[in-house]
Every structure is written in C-alpha cells, then in structure tokens.
Image: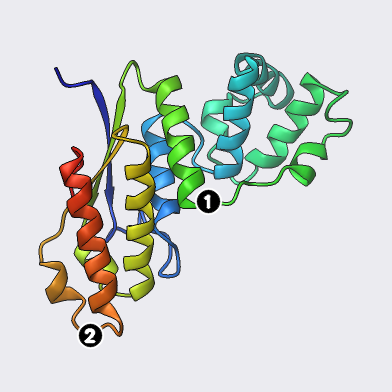
Amino acid sequence: ELAPALTVFLELSSSQDVTSESEGLVPPMFRALLARLDYAQSPKLAGLEFDLETEGRLDAFEATFEQVTGKPWRTHRHTSLAVNSASRALHALDPETFPSAEAWSRDFQTPSLTAKWFVRRAVEMLDRRGAGAKRLIFVVDEVSQYIARSIDRIRAMHGVAEEFKALGGRVWLVATGQERLEEVVEGLEGKQSELQRLREELMVICSMGFAG
C-alpha cells in the first residue's frame, strides 16, 4: 500500500517561481513548499510562524497581531510592512523576550537556505501541515532549460537530489523537461562529468522509489 503523499509543483522557467537568474534551486523550491502548506512566503516570516507553532503560540500571536495592527495576520503577512508589524506584535505578546517593538525584526537571523537544511525543514513542515501525508513529492518542470544556463545549476540539482536520497524515501524529486539533458548542456564547460554525476544520482534515486 502506497503511503499518502503531498505534491508541490514548481516551474523553473517561470518568473513567478524563480525571481532572478542568480538564484539557486533551493529558494524557489522552498517558496513553493511554503505556499503549498500555507506558511508566509518570506523565509523570515515563515521561520517565525514555524517557531511559534513549535511553542504552541501561533494562534496567540495572530490574535495579538490583529489587536496591535487592526489587520489579520494571514492577509498582512504578504506585505512589505509585515516584518516590522510582526515585531510590534511579538513585543506586545511577550515583552520579556522582546523588550522593544524593534527587537525581533532587528535580531532575528534568517536561516541559510542550504539543501541539507531545506530538506529537513520540509519534512518537519510536512509532518505538521501535511494532513497525514507521509511523503513529499516535488514536481519540478522545465529542468532541462534551467540547468542549461549554468554548470553550477547542475551541481545544485545534484546536491538537492543527494539530500532527498538521504531521507530514505520521504521526499521525492520528479524532474521534467521538453529536451534531453545531453542536448541542452552541450555548450557548458565541464558538463560531461557533472551531467554523469547527476544522471547516476537520479538512477540511484529511481531505484529507491524516487523519480527524476
């Protein structure tokens, strides 16, 4: 019997999903996961929600936020003023921990979005908000176009695939594209060794129940 799974879709050729040419693979994957599980789109604010959820204080924070700002958290969290407003609400909720209205916005450090951190945080979020799903499936479209732009992107894809494999089947990667990988990376220096590593990794993943 197959374990229930939650699917997250991501299109790497879309400006909505990839915000800049220099952006790595993990940030757009993380944003897609945050949207799918109804967390704030900002990694900093999503981190706040996750921490408050861990402490069992997210509902209290949302109520305090509306009292302080006059606006619901879930609609205001996507605005440019959300970080400062959240900091004011945290001061009102817990003035001992946050002694000023600027304390949280000034002192909180957004975690580094490495592949290792992302994959483990993804599983934690799935366990909390996945409605009973035991596996997380990322369907990443237009991979061939994405990695054709840079040898570093092939390495990034390989790094994410390795971290997925390390979790023993809890996170799957389904990579799709309109062209064969060999065809789109032909002009990249050092492509053969990196592409072979990626192909071998995906073959191992497939043999463990992953797809790529």
The image quarter containing residue 31 is top left
Looking at the image, residue 194 lies above or below residue 2 = below
Q: CA distance from mark 2 to mark 1?
A: 29 Å
Q: Residues within 10 Å of mark 2 (few under 14, many from 20)?
A: few
Which amino acid type is marked by label 1? Leu
Q: Quadrant of residue 24?
A: bottom left
Task: Report the quarter where the N terminus lies.
Answer: top left
**Image location (x, y in percent) of residue 12:** 29, 58
Does residue 204 appear left or right of residue 83 in this picture?
left
Task: Tell me the tag on residue 113.
Answer: 1
Q: Secondary structure at mark 1?
A: loop
> Can you tell which mark lies on residue 187?
2
Please give left or right for residue 204 compared with residue 86 in the image.
Answer: left
Residue in the image at 38% along x and 57% along y: 159
Residue 92 in the image: above or below residue 160: above
Residue at 74%, 27% (x, y): give it: 89
Does the image show residue 44? yes
